[in-house]
């Protein structure tokens, strides 16, 4: 690896910007891993989170070391109705559909109370890790392509990934506990996964949606939910009042 970039201020700026971006993109990973690991016995959840994030780290570094192959995924493979589709498009489409499917199924289980049905019990440690690995590939692919566009040095990209995954490892447990303790936050997180899945589908069909809009909507929703949680802790219930209608005049005798 080349470390000549350490004397280049622009490279340090790229490292800082890329690290922040990787952390933001990694929040999706933490939420997904938290929800999937929550289906396991409590004794296995921390282990599943650690393995899931370790797999995310390995996947991203391997993809960075295979940049030529990754960038080759953007080359058109076939054309349908005048629209080119590449390997990256197919991965994004598959990942988007999978995210939407998993989020909708989870919401159904939460609302219908089928958490302890036969299907729910069938979830094994290996199955959960397999699903985490599948989504790690989806999120890592998008992350690596972003990294290639922002930084020139491979060392800078790998450092940004290492720092961001370290951040995720440090806070994954707290995020998971918070999500588990607040059912409304869990529903909000599942809604976010649907939103991310729709974004992936749009990207796969070459409809570009500015990530800033998506993250703003997510951040706004989180702020509103935090205010709701704060109000509930104080024991205050927000009541909505309709407009006061004028009282009918007394009937004349």
Image (spheres, rainbow, N blue to C red):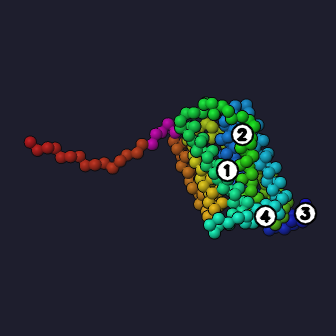
Q: Of the residues under marks 1 and 3, which one precedes in the sequence?
A: 3
Mark 2 = which residue? 128
Q: Judge whether residue 156 can be spotted in this image.
A: no
Mark 1 = which residue? 28
Residue 125 vertical position relative to residue 251 in the rendered view, above or below: above
Mark 3 = which residue? 2
Q: Quadrant of the N terminus?
A: bottom right
Left or right of residue 205, residue 224 in this image: left
Q: Please tell me whether mark 1 or mark 2 is closer to you in this view.
A: 2
Residue 119 picture location, percent across and down: 63, 34
Q: Are marks 1 and 2 in contact (CB under 8 Å)?
A: no
Q: Secondary structure at mark 4?
A: helix
Q: Of the residues under marks 4 and 2, which one precedes in the sequence?
A: 4
Check residue 149 for magenta coloring: no
How packed mark 4 is, by other alpha carbons closer than 10 Å (few <14, some 14-19, many 20 or more), is few
Residue 247 vertical position relative to residue 40 in the rendered view, above or below: below
Q: Please tell me whether mark 3 or mark 2 is closer to you in this view.
A: 2
Q: Secondary structure at mark 3?
A: loop
Residue 102 found in image quarter:
top right
Q: Are marks 1 and 3 in contact (CB under 8 Å)?
A: no
The tag on residue 72 is: 4
Q: Please tell me whether mark 4 or mark 2 is closer to you in this view.
A: 4
- Whole-angstrom CA distance, mark 4 to mark 2, is 30 Å
* Range shown magenta: 232-238
């Amino acid at each position: 690896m080349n470390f000549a970039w350490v004397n280049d201020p622009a490279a340090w700026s790229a490292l800082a910007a890329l690290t922040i971006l990787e952390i933001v993109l990694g929040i999706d990973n933490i939420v997904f891993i938290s929800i999937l690991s929550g289906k396991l016995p409590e004794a296995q959840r921390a282990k599943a989170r650690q393995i899931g994030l370790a797999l995310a780290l390995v996947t991203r570094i391997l993809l960075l070391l295979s940049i030529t192959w990754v960038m080759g995924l953007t080359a058109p493979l076939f054309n349908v109705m005048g629209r080119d589709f590449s390997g990256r498009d197919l991965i994004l489409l598959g990942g988007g559909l999978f995210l939407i499917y998993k989020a909708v199924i989870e919401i159904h289980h939460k609302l219908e109370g089928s958490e302890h049905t036969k299907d729910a019990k069938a979830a094994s440690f290996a199955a959960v890790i397999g699903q985490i690995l599948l989504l790690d590939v989806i999120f890592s692919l998008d992350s690596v392509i972003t990294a290639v566009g922002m930084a020139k040095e491979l060392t800078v990209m790998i450092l940004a990934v290492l720092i961001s995954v370290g951040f995720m490892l440090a806070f994954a447990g707290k995020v998971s506990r918070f999500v588990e303790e607040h059912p409304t936050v869990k529903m909000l997180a599942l809604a976010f996964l649907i939103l991310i899945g729709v974004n992936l589908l749009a990207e796969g069909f070459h409809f570009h949606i500015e990530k800033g809009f998506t993250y703003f909507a997510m951040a706004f929703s989180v702020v509103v939910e935090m205010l709701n949680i704060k109000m509930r802790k104080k024991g205050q219930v927000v009541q909505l009042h309709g407009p006061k209608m004028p009282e009918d005049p007394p009937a004349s005798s």
